[in-house]
Image (cartoon, coloured by chain):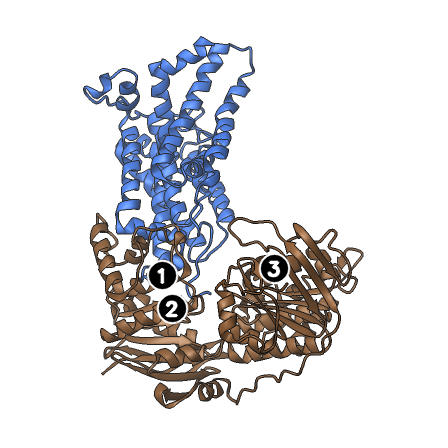
Chain colours: A brown, B blue
Amino acid sequence: MTVLRLSSITKRFGPLVANDAISLDLARGEVVALLGENGAGKTTLMNILFGHYVADEGTVEAFGKELPPGDPRAALDAGIGMVHQHFTLADNMTVLENIALGTEPLFAPRFRREAARQKIRKLSADFGLEVHPDSLVSALTVGERQRVEILKALYRDARILILDEPTAVLTPLETDALFATLRKLVAEGLSIIFISHKLNEVMAISDRVIVLRAGKVAGERRTADTDRKALAALMVGQDLVSPPVAPAVTGPALLVMEHVSTPRRGTGIALSDVTLSLHSGEITGVAGVSGNGQAALAGLLSGLETPQSGSMTVQGHGPDGWSPVAALEAGIARIPEDRHAVGAIADMSVMENVISERYRTPRFSKHGFMDWKAARNFAEEIIRDYDVKCPGPDARIRLLSGGNMQKLILGRALDPEPVIILANQPTRGLDVGAIAYVHGRLLEARARGAAVLLISEDLDEILTLADRIVVISGGRLSAPSARGERTVRELGELMAGHAEAAHAP
Amino acid sequence: MSEAFDILFQTTFWVAAIRIASPLIFATMGELICERAGVLNLGIEGIMVAGAFAGWFTVYSGGDLWAGVLVAAATGAAFGLLHSTLTVPLGLSQHVVGIGVTLLATSLTYFTYRLALPEVTSPPKIEAFQPLPIPFLSDIPLVGPALFAQTPLTYLAFITVAIVAWVLYRTPLGLAVRAAGENPSAVEAQGISVTAIRMGAVMVGSALMAVGGAFLTMSAFNSFFFEMVNGRGWICIALVVFGSWRPGKALLGAILFAAFDAYQVRLQQVTGGVVPYQLFLMLPYLLSILALVLVARRATYPKALMVPYQKGER
C-alpha cells in the first residue's frame, strides 16, 4: 500500500534547479533511503513535502489525498512527521512543552500537562526513546534531543517519519540506539524516509535506496540487490577513486612537544605529559573518542593554549609569547574542527573570509588601508584552484554548502604553503566527493614536505592517511605506531582507555 | 535619621508606592508579553503617551471611564499593529522601528491634543477613577489601605499580572508565545504561524502599555499634559529584565521601583533643602541600575529576542 507519493516535483531557486521532476513513493512499513551528496536536493525535496517550501511544479499525495502546498499544518495533520537536521527545539523549555506545543487548541483555557506527560511516558517506553518529560532541553545531550524530535512526531500520531541526516550528530552508540528505535517503528507499520549521505548506514537500515544527483533521481535500487560501491558510483556519477597514498619521505622534526601539559579549562580535558613530534613529509594521525583532549591539543598548536609545563619548539624556536598570531607566523595552518563556528564568519563574504588570517600582511593592506583588489584576486584564485562552487567573491559564506565552505577554508590554509598543518576533523559532515578532495589536498601538502597533524574521530580516515598513529585518551597520548603496525582492534582498545602494558615513551 | 526610617511605616507612603507602581505594572506586563514572543517593543514610551491622551480625551468628550480605558487599549493595539507589521513580517530592525513608533506616537498625540483643544492654556480636568475601598480588607493596618483602598484600575493591574502569568504558563497559547521567543522554527515546525503569534503578542502588549499610560490621566491625575509619561516606558523595559521575563518577579520590581520613587519624595521633605533635590530624583534610577546588576546578570533571556523570523530561510 502506498502511503506517500511525490509526483514530478520541481523547485527552482533563481537559476538553480534544486529539484528537477523528482518522483518518489513510499509503502507502508518501508524504509526508503534518500541518498545523495550535499547539495543534491535531498533537504529541499523534504522541505517541499513538509510544506516549508512551495514547489514550482508537481504534487504531494499522502494516504491518497493531495496536500495543499506550503502548509506545514496540513502535512502534520496528514500524519507526516519530520526530524530536521538542525533541531527545532526551544532550549529554555521542557521536553514536554516542546512536544506538546501546537497539539492543543491555542485558545484552550488550560494546557493539559498531566495527560501530555502520560502520553510521552508511554511512547518513550514503547519505542525505547528514554527521556525525562520535565527536563529542560538545554540540559539534554544531542542524542536525547533527537529522541525529543522523534517523540514530537510520534506524539502527533505520525505514520510517516522523515529523518534528515539523523546520524550526523550522533555517536556510534547513539546511532545503534536510533536504528533499534526505527526498526520498532517500522514493525508498528510506520513508513520512514531516511536522508543520508553515509553509505554504510543506508545499507544497514533501508529497504530501498533512491539516489539523487544534482537535483535529479540518478537511480533506484533495492538495498538487498546493491552494494556500497555501486551506490557511491551512482551518487557521484562516476567511479570514485581514492587518492593513492605514496610512501612517506620523512624529513626533520618541525614541531616537538616534550612532556607538555596544558591548564584545565572548565569541564574540558587538558593534555597531560604529552610527547609528540611532527616530521616534515609525514601525516601524524591522532585517533580517539571525542572529548579526550583533542580540543586542548588543537588549541595548543593553533596558539589558543599555552603549555603549562614541558617544552614545545616550533622549527627550533620556543613558544615564547605563543598566541594565534605567533602560530600563524611560525607557519602553522589551521583547518578548524567546527567550520561554521570557528572557521568562518558566516555573514561576511567569501573574499573577507579568505583573507581573515592574513589581512594585516603587506599583500592585503598597506599603511593601514585594505587592498581590496588584491583580496578579490586572491579570493578568485582560491575559488578557481580549489574548485569552490559559489557565486563569487562577494557571496556570503553562510550560503555555501559544507563541502564548498571546507574547500575554501582548505584553500585559505594551504595557499601560503604552510610548513605545519593542523587538520582537526577536516572531513566531518562532508560527502564522499568532498572527502576525497580534502584527502587529496592533504596528501599533496605532505608530498611537498609539510608536517600534518590529523585529528579525527573517523578511524578509517586515520588508517587511510596517517603515516604514524597516536591514540589520545584522557588527555594522554599513546606511543606512536607506524602505518599498519597496530590492528584496528588494538587501536580501539587504546581509544577505550586501556593502556598498553609496555608503554614506551 | 530616624525620620528617614519612619517613612517606611507611614500609610501614605505605601499607598503612594502602589499608586505609582500601577501604570508601571500594566506597561511592564505589556512589554513582557512582546519580549516573550521575541519582539523588543521600544514603542512603549510613545504608546503610553498615546494611551494617556486617548483615555483621557474619551472621558473629556463625554465618554464613560471604562470606555476611556477601552479606547486607550485600542489605540495601543493600533500602534502595536504598526510596530509588528514592520518588525514581524517585514523583519525590520526592532530598535529602529521601536524608537520610530515612540517618536510618532508622542508627536501625533501632541498634535491631536492641539487640534482638539487649540484654545486651552491650562489642561482641562475630568472626573477620574475614585478609590474603591474593599470592605474589611482595607481596614488592615498599613497593608490594607495600600492594597485594598485603591482605584479600580490598580486592582485591574494586579489582576492583569495574574492573567498574564496564567496564560503564559498554563495555556497552549502561552506555550506558543514563549516558544516563539525561544525558537520560532520550533513553532513553525509544529504547524503554528510565528507571524500570527508575534503580531498578536505585540498588539496585546501594546494595548496594556496604553492602559498603563491611561492610568496616569484617569486615575493618578485627572488631566493630560505634555511630558507626563516622563521615561516610565524605559523604566518598564528595565523592569522586564529585572524580573527575568517572569510576571511575578516583574511585579515585585515595579513595586520596588515605585517604593523608591515614593520614598525619595518624602526624603526630600525630611532633609529639607540641605541636599539638592535632584539627587533624590536620581535615586530610584540609580537603585534600579544597581538592582539590575545584582539580579539580572544571570537571567535567561528569550533566545530569539530581537531575531526576526523569515519562513523558509535557513
**Is residue A458 at all visible to an observer of this figure?**
no
Q: Secondary structure at mark 1?
A: helix
Amino acid on which the number 3 mark rests in the picture: Leu
Percent across and percent down for residue B46 are: 45, 39
Percent across and percent down for residue B260 are: 44, 23
Q: Which is nearer the eye, A331 or A210?
A: A331
Q: Secondary structure at mark 2?
A: loop
Q: Which chain is indicated by disc 3? A: A
In this rendering, the answer to whether A94 lies above or below A123 is: above
Percent across and percent down for residue A254 are: 73, 66
Q: Which is nearer the eye, B209 or A134?
A: A134
Q: Nearer the viewer, mark 3 or mark 2?
A: 3
Whether residues under marks 2 and 1 lie with C-beta atoms below 8 angstroms apart, the answer is: yes
Marks 2 and 1 on same chain: no
Q: Which chain is indicated by disc 1? A: B
Q: Residue at x 54, y 87 (%)?
A: A240
Q: Residue at x 73, y 55 (%)?
A: A319
Q: Residue at x 31, y 31 (%)?
A: B59
* Crowding at mark 1 (Cα within 10 Å: few <14, some 14-19, many 20+): many
| Quadrant in the rendering for residue A123 | bottom left
Numbered mark located on residue A52 in the image = 2
* Crowding at mark 2 (Cα within 10 Å: few <14, some 14-19, many 20+): many
Q: Which residue is mark 1?
A: B188
